[in-house]
Image (cartoon, helix red, strand yellow):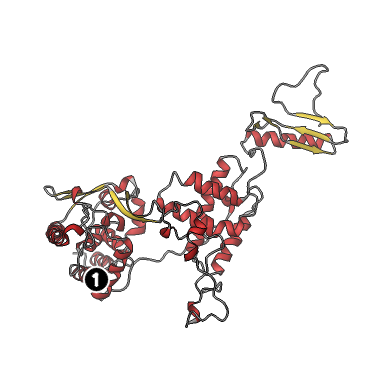
């Protein structure tokens, strides 16, 4: 259907679309879809051999404009440019440290090397799926690929919100399937063995707290005497201890850490008796540093921002109070007395920070050392190997066995949502036996 002609001598209103026959014999159309950075109208151009075809193109542009599906003017960013901008300028100021570290690993180690050269408006869902498959073929776990997928989804959804894209390609990507392993909480006997082994060590009550109260590692290591209400036997969880990576303070991070760069070994390497220890590109061997390596910030003379740092707890729900069981409170009081003697013995070497759990010099405990001690305690107790975080799962499961109401469990564990109980509460052998006994009583012993 031909377009309606405008009366002779009149002009189209400002912002209206225009269609005209050019001197080149083609029909042309322009549609105002917004304003460019310089303040001038953004009027994309379309052309076709016939007037009907260009009318269809103009109307499609108008529909996309009205639906908010027209991307910003200018050349589209590459995936590498957008991801770098997103992680450093958009995500970095708004997310927690560990979340940001996960984003950076996904962006710089996987997404940019894998798909960074594409333009963001031309990348397809299949590019992501092929990347995830290639990662897993190279030995990466499905959970790692899933983390990369979540990062890509966050980054490209933001690109869509800012009109760099008309639609996020990650929306149609099938995420890698992750099989969550069922956590087996410690049995009462195992818990008693762990507690007995832990109390033979300095700071042993720290692991009792992990099992009984279900504190996160950073929360427990961040305990301070000033937050302990002795009169009411309350502890106020407000802050946590966290190890953060050091940042370079120099102008050239690559050269700053040059003496620490790992260089690939030669075929006839004589530095390593065992060839498996060679630094090579082969799968299963230690990898050399990349050509533009800017790590090794821990050796920078101007390093900043790293080391053990006190941070806010994970969420608003994490700011909570524990009423300490009598046994734990008594253990803490005995622990305080031992620490008082250590402080006297250390003399001027003692660095007072008010920490409840400390090194012999008063400094806080590194999470890595804490994890190592947990593994040693499990071995001494003769208990199966397990994550430190499994102690938190055990504490949550015990609350379920004790029939503690859901709302109280949520408050005690510091969960933002009670739905977390599906992840942390597990059906134990005792509970299965209790169900069997109840069924016995219901069907076969009704009296």
Which residue occupies the foreground of this view, 126 or 98?
Answer: 98
Residue at the top extreme?
Answer: 9
Tally of marks: 1
Q: Position of residue 446 (x, y in %)?
A: 21, 64
437 with respect to 114 (left or right): left
Residue 410 seen from this side: no
Element on which disc 1 rests: helix
The quadrant holding residue 9 is top right
Where 299 sits versus 50, above or below? below
Residue at the bottom extreme?
Answer: 273
Where 426 sits versus 90, above or below? below
Which residue occupies the foreground of this view, 14 or 59?
Answer: 14
193 with respect to 390 (left or right): left
Identify the residue under disc 1: 190
Which residue occupies the foreground of this view, 108 or 52?
Answer: 108
Q: Position of residue 19 (x, y in %)?
A: 79, 30
Q: Position of residue 311 (x, y in %)?
A: 33, 49
Q: Quadrant of the N terminus?
A: top right
Q: Residue at x 56, y 69 (%)?
A: 137
Q: Quadrant of the C terminus?
A: bottom left
Residue 441 seen from this side: yes
Q: Residues within 10 Å of mark 1 (few under 14, many from 20)?
A: some
Q: Residue at x 19, y 48 (%)?
A: 226
């Amino acid at each position: 259907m031909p377009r309606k002609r405008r009366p002779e001598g009149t002009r189209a209103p400002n912002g209206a679309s225009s269609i005209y026959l050019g001197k080149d014999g083609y029909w042309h159309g322009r549609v105002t879809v917004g304003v460019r950075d310089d303040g001038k109208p953004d009027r994309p151009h379309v052309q076709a051999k016939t007037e009907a075809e260009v009318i269809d193109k103009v109307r499609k542009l108008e529909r996309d404009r009205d639906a908010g599906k027209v991307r910003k003017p200018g050349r589209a960013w590459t995936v590498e440019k957008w991801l770098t901008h997103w992680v450093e300028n958009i995500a970095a100021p708004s997310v927690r440290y560990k979340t940001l570290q996960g984003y950076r690993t996904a962006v710089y180690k996987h997404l940019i090397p894998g798909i960074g050269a594409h333009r963001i408006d031309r990348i397809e869902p299949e590019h992501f799926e092929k990347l995830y498959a290639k990662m897993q073929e190279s030995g990466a776990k499905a959970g790692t690929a899933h983390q990369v997928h979540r990062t890509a989804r966050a980054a490209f959804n933001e690109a869509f919100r800012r009109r760099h894209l008309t639609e996020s390609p990650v929306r149609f990507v099938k995420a890698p399937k992750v099989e969550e392993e069922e956590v087996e909480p410690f049995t009462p006997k195992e818990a008693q063995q762990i507690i007995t082994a832990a109390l033979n060590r300095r700071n042993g009550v720290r692991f009792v707290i992990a099992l009984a109260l279900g504190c996160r590692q950073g929360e427990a290591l961040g305990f301070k005497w000033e937050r302990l209400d002795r009169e009411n036997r309350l502890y106020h969880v407000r802050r946590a201890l966290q190890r953060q990576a050091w940042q370079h303070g120099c102008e050239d991070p690559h050269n700053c850490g040059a003496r620490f760069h790992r260089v690939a070994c030669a075929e006839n390497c004589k530095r390593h008796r065992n060839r498996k220890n060679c630094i090579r590109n082969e799968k299963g061997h230690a990898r050399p540093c990349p050509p533009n390596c800017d790590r090794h910030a821990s050796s920078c003379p101007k390093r900043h921002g790293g080391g053990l740092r006190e941070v806010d707890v994970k969420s608003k729900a994490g700011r909570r109070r524990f009423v300490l069981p009598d046994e734990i409170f008594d253990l803490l009081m005995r622990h305080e007395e031992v620490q008082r003697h250590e402080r006297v013995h250390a003399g001027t070497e003692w660095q007072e920070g008010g920490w409840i759990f400390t090194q012999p010099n008063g400094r806080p405990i590194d999470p890595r050392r804490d994890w190592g001690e947990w593994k040693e305690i499990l071995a001494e107790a003769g208990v199966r190997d397990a994550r430190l975080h499994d102690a938190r799962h055990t504490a949550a499961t015990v609350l379920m066995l004790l029939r503690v109401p859901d709302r109280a469990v949520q408050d005690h564990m510091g969960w933002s949502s009670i739905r977390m109980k599906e992840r942390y509460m597990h059906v134990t052998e005792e509970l299965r036996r209790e169900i069997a006994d109840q069924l016995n009583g219901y069907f076969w012993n009704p009296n």
